[in-house]
Amino acid sequence: MSLVSTADSSQQDLDRLATLAEDTIRRARAAGASQAEVSASIDTGLSVNVRLGEVETVEHTRDRGFSLTVYFGQRKGSASTADLNPDSIQATIEQACAIARFTEEDPAAGLADADRMATSFPDLDLWHPWDLDVDQAIALGQAIEDGGREVAGITNSDGSSVNTGRSLSVYANSHGFLGRERGTRHSLSVALIAGEDDAMQRDYWYDSGRRAQDFMDPAEIGRKAAERTLSRLNARRLGTRQSPVLFAPEVARGLLGHLLGAISGGSLYRRSSFLVDHAGKQILPSWFRLDEKPLIPRGLGSSVFDAEGVATVESPLVVDGVLQRYILGSYSARKLGLQSTGNAGGVHNLVVKTGDDDFAGMLRQLGTGLLVTEVMGQGVSIVTGDYSRGASGFWVENGEIAYPVEEITIAANLRDMYAGLAAVGADVDRRSHVLTGSWLIEKMTIAGE
């Protein structure tokens, strides 16, 4: 199969979206809007699912989106369409303007400040189309699944998936800003089953990235999934206790997600976060550092500008355990009397400073305690910080995995978990825009039998 992109029409599509966006803004202004902004996108992709060597689904996608927001003073109206023909665009303009004329004024409403718009647009190496046809994708899915099914002890399969996608987007506003972005994202995955009847266990593995050349060997993905699945056989429950807990990297980044939720503008101006008024205060150990790095080449969260056109910049979120700033777009910033941090639409590539220990070293640091490889449920309150989730993983004794565990609950308060973070491993999971290793928490309550 070819991993080299053929000539594509992406630049022509971006040109068309840009022309349409600018024309729509002019027409909205002519209809009386004092400010206007447009987001337009075209997403294409191929998804193939294979199970037990047979094709289950093949899906080609081509989705288009077009949204317009207008401001009449500080009254806001928004409308959207997936149809880019002239009549639909005109109807979208009319609907947005009609909504704005009848909404209440909001002192925080409006475009981001004009002087914050991005003016430099470096190439971040985000565009790596994968010219994969259906037959090649099927063969690849079969190779992934075969790699796992060939491992002794695997009894069944939930199937493998091959996905490739391309995204083109334009954001424009009446400040005169026009930003274009194009990016690719591809993934391979498989889920396998071991054991029989009530003793069955299921697990998975995957790889994901901007460029297909960076994938691990497809059969190795299958073998990794098989290894994880087999390791869960004969799982036990634990009696209620308190112990240190090690979160595997792919689970640890969820702990960062809760932190981001607590320091995001919407939670803060509504006073619905346990970290309200915590900027400048210590919330993590003095050795902990967290940086946002939006301009990493080929990064999964890389972007030159945010969803409002504000230039993204590398900046710290936590230094020496002290929270440096919040996560703000222009609206939440105005509600708080602050400035946008260039995070309208979310964060861009978070990088946690790691320690020196690999995964084996982190197990040794854990000593005797719980290794969590999966969490379930929604038992996390950003308002209070209370954390209680179903979990599975492994009981560890003297730095070595002793046996798998399941059907347990782990609980604590996020404030205590962050303060009680003992170490971050060097075993960074790079399949996400949140780059962190495993997290060792000093003490949590484990409830089981």
Image: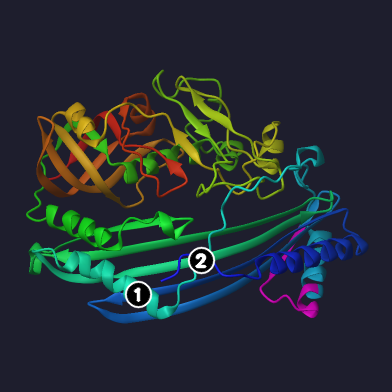
Between 327 and 193, the residue placed more toward the observer is: 193
- Residue 169, x across and y down, in percent: 66, 61
- Residue 221, x across and y down, in percent: 27, 59
- Residue 415, x across and y down, in percent: 39, 29
Q: CA distance from mark 2 to mark 1?
A: 15 Å
Residue depicted at x 75% and y 43%? 112
Reading the image, the residue beneath label 1 is: 49
Callout 1: few (<14), some (14-19), or many (20+) C-alpha neighbours within 10 Å? many
| Whether residue 244 is visible | no
Q: Magenta stretch: residue 87 in it? A: yes
Residue depicted at x 79% and y 67%? 20
* Quadrant in the rendering for residue 397: top left
Q: Quadrant of the N terminus?
A: bottom left
Q: Left or right of 39: which side holds 177?
A: right
The image's mark for residue 260 is none
* Quadrant in the rendering for residue 120: top right
Q: Secondary structure at mark 2?
A: strand
The image's mark for residue 165 is 2
Q: Disc 2 marks which amino acid?
A: Gly
* Quadrant in the rendering for residue 422: top left
Relative to 247, does residue 93 appear above or below in the rendering?
A: below
| Whether residue 377 is visible | yes
N-terminal of the pair, mark 2 or mark 1, is 1
Q: Are marks 2 and 1 in contact (CB under 8 Å)?
A: no
Residue depicted at x 76% and y 79%? 85
Q: Secondary structure at mark 1?
A: strand
Relative to 117, does residue 205 appear above or below in the rendering?
A: below
Relative to 364, does residue 80 appear above or below in the rendering?
A: below
Q: Disc 1 marks which amino acid?
A: Asn
Q: In the image, which residues are magenta?
A: 77-89
Q: Magenta stretch: residue 202 in it? A: no
